[in-house]
Amino acid sequence: MEKVLNFIEGEFREPVGVAFLENYNPATGQVYSLVSQSETQDVDMAVVAAKKALPAWKKMNADDRFRILNRIAELIERDLDKLAAAESRDQGKPVWLAKTEMQRAAQNFRFFATAAMQFASESHQTDSRAINYTLRQPVGVVGCISPWNLPLYLFTWKIAPAMAAGNCVIAKPSEFTPFTAYMLGALCNEAGLPAGVLNIVHGLGSGVGQAMVEHPEIKAISFTGGTATGRHIASVAAPMFKKLSLELGGKNANIIFADADLKEAVKTSVRSSFLNQGEICLCGSRVFVEKPVYEKFKAELLEELKQLKTGNPEDDAVRVGAIVSKQHFEKVLSYIILAKEEGGVVLTGGEAVTPAGFEQGWFIAPTVIEGLGWNCRTNQEEIFGPVITLIPFETEDEVLQMANSTAYGLATTLWTGDLKRAHRMAEALETGIVWVNCWLLRDLRTPFGGMKQSGVGREGGWEAMRFFTEPKNVCVAY
Ligand code: NDP
């Protein structure tokens, strides 16, 4: 069985303890590869390699760094089909969707390689007596920890700006979805990335992840994952004053006003609820609909969902693939049971499905529930699966209060034909991202991240370049 090995100092290495975890294909429920179960010693070795590579990498001419990172982007594109097939097998998502994410992974490298070339520093004159300028220096050795939902896309979203800014990286993908990060190691070597600039250590969060956060030589941690894990990481990192970027969970509202283009709102709500099996931190899981159009929206949504095929990830017509792991599959199903106990009425879905040929896989039918109050557990806790609730509302103030009444603050989608209302709502919503009459239109230059328990800091564009650099002000008198 193929082994997912660590990538340290440009070499593929078995973990020091020679222990491996089983890696499952969620569509078949079968083990298909073994993942290195690394520990503290493996992280230590990766840090030694990164420290060795750091002086040359941070001094490298920006143009040369640009060329290497751009080359990685080209190689991802060359191997797009292979990477997408591997991502789908590891994560459960449809292959066609994985292809779009692999393009985005390539784009992450291209975008941040270019950003590094244009990352200007500030300068300020002091009363004709002195000039101040700000050096933006790499932080040093940094850690990047990523989740399982958009594996290579989120992995590269972190490592690309970190390397572009001149840092050397220790990175840990989720042990549920390590395969494309493993494949990336070979592409980095082919692109001529110097050994030790990127080190990938596989294993459990409680082992490798914890060792990274505790390591005194890893000066910053960029983490995307659940809020509970983020809270734990913050508590471990705080005594060391380690730089932290935390992109955490969400319980996003999708708000449909009666004056919206209903057809467009229905079509996009299907995507924003069920793309990637609802396993995207930005998916809207609480759908608030203004009362005059509630029944019409519901009927059209349910009609549209009849077309949504669940099953074989290799089938281009399939829109909903398998749930990433057995644990997560059971967690999502337990929330459907909870919703019923809380008085919810399942309008469609509500159960596991077994597509022909995939009887052992972990599939859940797209599920729509109504009849729940905005403050019940189902409407407050992150489910992170193909489950949404419909909630009617009467006024703008009422929906604003309900939308904001959650511990999370990641994203909101608004559907309205009233421009003034759109601006008013966007200003009042307590989320880091607001989409108006669209969803998941991403521009890599924009700040990305959440408020409240959805995280600390932002990624994307200059935000990422700032996070991965230390500003140093130099004041020169003349
Ligand atoms: P987890 O928090 O369980 O894990 C995220 C990563 O952290 C994994 O690599 C995990 O490793 C690792 N980890 C776990 N424990 C520790 C620890 N003690 N120290 C260091 N690292 C640790 O999240 P999931 O993988 O379940 O991802 C789903 C979550 O991610 C959802 O809550 C979702 O909302 C959020 N997310 C947020 C996004 C955002 O931008 N705000 C984007 C995408 C997802 P291991 O897998 O081995 O446990």
Image (cartoon, rainbow, N blue to C red):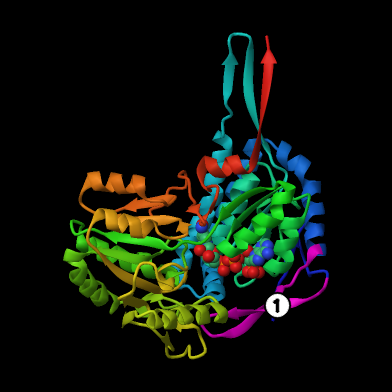
Q: Which residue is at the front of the view, 269 or 445?
A: 269
Q: Which residue is mark 1?
A: 21
The residue under the point 19% across, 72% down is 295
Label 1: few (<14), some (14–19) or many (≥20) C-alpha neighbours in 10 Å: some
The residue under the point 30% across, 58% down is 399
Query: Percent position (x, y) of residue 1?
Result: 69, 81
* Residue 432 shows in this picture: yes
Say whether residue 64 is left or right of residue 308.
right
Magenta segment boundaries in residue numbering: 17-40
Query: Percent position (x, y) of residue 472?
Result: 67, 30
Q: Which residue is at the front of the view, 200 or 400?
A: 400
Q: Secondary structure at mark 1?
A: strand
The residue under the point 57% across, 74% down is 90
Q: Quadrant of ligand 1?
A: bottom right
Q: Which residue is at the front of the view, 30 or 233?
A: 233
Whether residue 323 appears in magenta in the rendering, the answer is no
Whether residue 28 appears in magenta in the rendering, the answer is yes
The residue under the point 56% across, 53% down is 157
Query: Percent position (x, y) of residue 350?
Result: 38, 83
Query: Percent position (x, y) of residue 309?
Result: 35, 79
Tell me the kind of residue under disc 1. Leu
Say whether residue 7 is left or right of residue 184.
right
Q: Which residue is at the front of the view, 477 or 100?
A: 477
